[in-house]
Amino acid sequence: MSSLPSVAPHPLARYGWDDGWAERFAPYAAQGLLPGRVVRVDRGRCDLVTATGTVHADTEFVVPRDPMQVVCTGDWAGVDPHGDPRYVRTLLPRRTAFVRSTSSKRSEGQILAANVDHAIVAVSLAVELDLGRIERFLALAWESGAQPLVVLTKADLVADAAGLSYLVRDVETAAPGVPVVPVSAVTGDGLDVLAAVVSGGTSVLLGQSGAGKSTLANALLGEDVMEVQAARDVDGKGRHTTTTRNLLVLPGGGVLIDTPGLRGVGLFDAESGVEQVFSEIADLAGECRFHDCAHEREPGCAVLAAVDSGELPERRLESYRKLMRENQWIVAKTDARLRAEIRRDWKRKGAEGRAAMEAKRGRWA
Ligand code: GDP
Ligand code: ZN
């Protein structure tokens, strides 16, 4: 028997609060701010769970021009407990973040979820495997900073065990360093493995529509959890609310974030994520004769040699090139925006500088 005094867990511990967050938050706690985790964001307002219940707060604050400083689900934030209007006063630096490349005109990123530990990529075994698509999701997952896990769903639809292990191995070749787990919501197979992974930290479910994400979420959540949680929510004024949350505590431990935006995410500046998905290509590239080898037709290219010898499937190299090209295009778009901003800044500074100089020389008017 332990003789250690028992310490009641922090009320936010089940939402992921730990010593690291407490340390980061200490200066704000000293200012009288209350820590909370953002469970929902909607048009300039957000819901946070705090030690004393759910509070609603305005999200307008800090650096409004920086899209990365926009409050998002999963953030740890500080609110003024007595403020009226109450608003988010600070965001703790994110450990990880999912960023999407916004469509067409605006190339800056949009934060989809923050402080995610596990990115669960759901892949249906009911349709033919698309390894390229899996690689795309994995690049995004690695780029966020979260640890990916591939879940092969609907395993009950694969007739024999040998066939299933063949499919698992196939996916493993496209996912170095990533566990691949077959599951079935029908038989329950593999769900315990998934539950064990997600019990430690915050998870998101990624994957194509129809991959089985909602089914997995329901299996993890148990059926009536959503309603129970909604009924328990109390806003700052003591009213019960029934708003839906995008961040839920799992009965077996851990937190699940499910936002509409996470469905069908694209790549954003995911170069290091792409490198990680194709780590065996990066390893081979280290042996190319030229350190800036593009693996196109350079002499002494270890990557092309590996394709020739059959060690590296050509499909992998093509998928790598495709993701790198797409990624570079997105980066170039972002850079164009940055360049325009820098140019504006210079023009403004230049005008101020000229005005100051002319004032000095007394050449006004
Ligand atoms: P989502 O779009 O990714 O959220 O996918 P859903 O969870 O809605 O699932 C899509 C379809 O696959 C639904 O018809 C589910 O009933 C079915 N499905 C999900 N999981 C399983 C499974 O383990 N086995 C089988 N046979 N069907 C499943
Ligand atoms: Zn090369």
Image: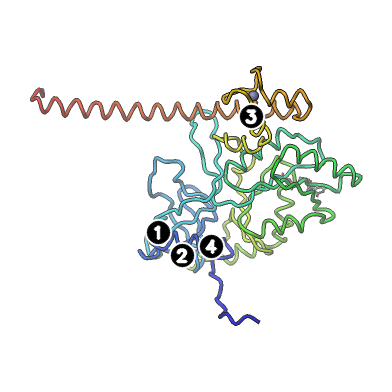
In primary-sequence order, the first of circles 2 and 4 is 4
Q: Nearer the viewer, mark 4 or mark 3?
A: 3
Asked if labels 1 and 2 touch by Cβ distance under 8 angstroms, the answer is yes
Q: Residue 34's spot in the image, x, y percent?
A: 43, 64
Asked if labels 4 and 1 touch by Cβ distance under 8 angstroms, the answer is no
Q: Is mark 4 within 8 Å of ligand 1?
A: no
In primary-sequence order, the first of circles 1 and 4 is 4
In primary-sequence order, the first of circles 2 and 1 is 1
Q: CA distance from mark 2 to mark 4?
A: 21 Å
Disc sitting over residue 17 in the figure: 4
Asked if labels 4 and 2 touch by Cβ distance under 8 angstroms, the answer is no
Q: Is mark 3 within 8 Å of ligand 2?
A: yes
Q: Residue 47's spot in the image, x, y percent?
A: 50, 57
Instruction: Look at the numbered disc 1 and give the secondary structure of its residue.
Output: loop
Amino acid, disc 2: Gly
Q: Locate residue 210: give its quadrant.
A: top right
